[in-house]
Amino acid sequence: MLLKPFDYYELRPCVEFEDHIQAFLGHAVYCPTRGGVIHTPEQAEAEARIVAEASGRPMFWTLYGVSDTATAIGNFKTFDAAYAVMVAILMPLRHAADTGDTVPLEDICNQSSTEERL
């Protein structure tokens, strides 16, 4: 199975119902520093809290990897817990981009793979 790498990661608040999980993106806003439309966790959280309170169901946060579609990576009770995992995933990439040192990335790939070379 050939996997496509994620283009980016995002955190979404979610509410689980009997037959589905509803993830919230929030309202799109223009970001002048990025020059495009973004969704902020604060907007999404406000929407999710309203739905969670109205339905009597708990709200949680999901870390998604996004390429053509969003793939759920993990669920977390708090934004801070989900954010910490996202930072841990991205930190070696940022280090390599800032320093040109790709050894940590090679180590992660080698230690995380099974019999296949990633």
Image (cartoon, rainbow, N blue to C red):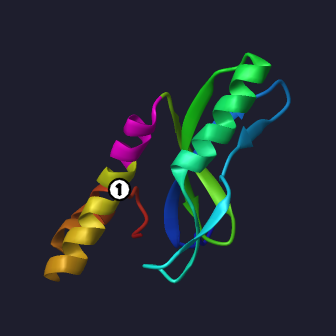
Q: Nearer the viewer, residue 107 or 33?
A: 33
Which residue is outermost to the right? 19
Residue 80: percent from left, percent from top: 38, 37
Which residue is outermost to the top? 56
Residue 111: percent from left, percent from top: 28, 56
Q: Nearer the viewer, residue 72 or 37?
A: 37
Task: Look at 75% across and 40% down and name the residue there.
Answer: 22
Task: Look at 62% across and 46% down and name the residue there.
Answer: 44
Place residue 37 in its image quadrant: bottom right
- Residue type, numbered disc 1: Ile
Secondary element at tag 1: helix
Place residue 89 in its image quadrant: bottom left
* 86 relative to 103 in the view: left or right: right
Magenta portion: prevailing SS class: helix
Task: Look at 70% across and 30% down and name the residue there.
Answer: 50
Vertical placement of residue 62 versus 118, above or below: above
Place residue 49 in its image quadrant: top right
Residue 19: percent from left, percent from top: 85, 30
Quarter of the figure with the C terminus: bottom left
Res 106 seen here: no
* 80 relative to 11 in the view: left or right: left
**Residue 84 in magenta?**
yes
Start and end of the magenta stretch?
78-85
Q: Nearer the viewer, residue 6 or 110?
A: 6
Pointer 1: what residue?
A: 89
* 106 relative to 86 in the view: left or right: left
Res 9 seen here: yes
